[in-house]
Image (spheres, rainbow, N blue to C red):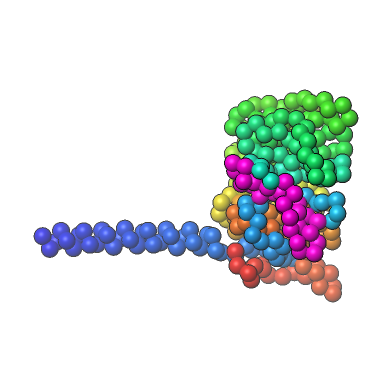
Amino acid sequence: MNMSLRLLKSALLAAAALVAAALMFFAWQYFFPVQAASGWSYRVAYDDVQKAAGLARAADGGILVSQELQDGRGSILLMQPDGDREVVVEGLSKPDGLLSARGGLVFSQESGDKPVSFLQGKRVSELFAGDQVQGLWDDGHYLYAIEDRKGNGRLWRYRWDDRQLSVVRDNLSETESITRCTDGRMLYSEKESGVIRELREDGRDPVVIDGLRNPTFLLCDEQGLWISEDSTHRARLLLVDAQGEQTTVLSFLKAPQAILPLDDGRYLIAEGGRDRVLELSVVRSAGGLKKTEIASDRQGG
């Protein structure tokens, strides 16, 4: 009997140790601060933004951020330069894509058959219907919208001048973002397969980058291709330059989403898993770029 009690006690202690270790591991993943690569630093630009997802510039100089909540609880916030914030659109379901265009704001809702909409002033109008539309891109003549669906997603193209709508691709799977690069290529992400594809006229759409972990938002600029990984733990913000060299600019992120370029080489990154927006900057000194060791957020992860 004593032997059985001792064995039971040992088993319970071992189970408790495993549970404690698991809890410590998950707590470490959540609270471990974001790390910035050498030559980069970051700070918290906006906190207390629930499930921050989309980012766009407002016409008055402020920043628009979507709160990707479900069931009509989502909204779009305007962050004013003076620090004030206000709700500009509410009652949304998983608002995700935000895009400044034609003096207003295009936004999508990644929930059911919600439309792609256009906010101009205080008036919201429906552009076209979609199903779980996430990524948006505009070239001035055409607005592109891509659906995040499993196996039956579509890439839409909407012509502003006459409202003509066409399907550019169908049968897509977990495609979350689309962008055009400075060299003219259009790229889109496939989250589940971990690849970036190039949109080609022949419809073949070859893989140009693979081996990624849940790639979501894409942004091309003079630095290269920026990729955020929509992972709950230890996600990264990557930069792929023109030579194809990949750099992890930020690591230990929690569900990062949109990236928005600002002035002077600064960027905003929506970190939905921690309900905040980060500002990323190049570290400079009197002699130019300062090569620093990996920096971390002193305010915590």
Pick the front one: 60 or 138: 60
Pick the front one: 9 or 124: 124
- Find out whether residue 68 is within the magenta segment: yes
Residue 266 image point, x, y percent: 79, 60
Instruction: Identify the residue at horizontal 45%, vertical 63% (top origin).
Output: 24
Instruction: Identify the residue at horizontal 60%, vertical 29% (top origin).
Output: 151
Q: Number of callouts in the render?
A: 0
Pick the front one: 34 or 76: 76
Instruction: Tell me the quadrant of the picture where the C terminus can be found.
Output: bottom right
The answer to which quarter of the image holds residue 233 is bottom right
Instruction: Identify the residue at horizontal 75%, vertical 69% (top origin).
Output: 291
Residue 35 image point, x, y percent: 64, 63
The answer, for residue 86, to whether it is visible in the render is: yes
Q: In the figure, is residue 174 to the left or right of 3?
A: right
Residue 194 image point, x, y percent: 62, 41
Instruction: Tell me the quadrant of the picture where the N terminus can be found.
Output: bottom left
Pick the front one: 45 or 126: 126
Q: Which residues are magenta?
A: 62-89
Q: In the figure, is residue 101 to the left or right of 108?
A: right
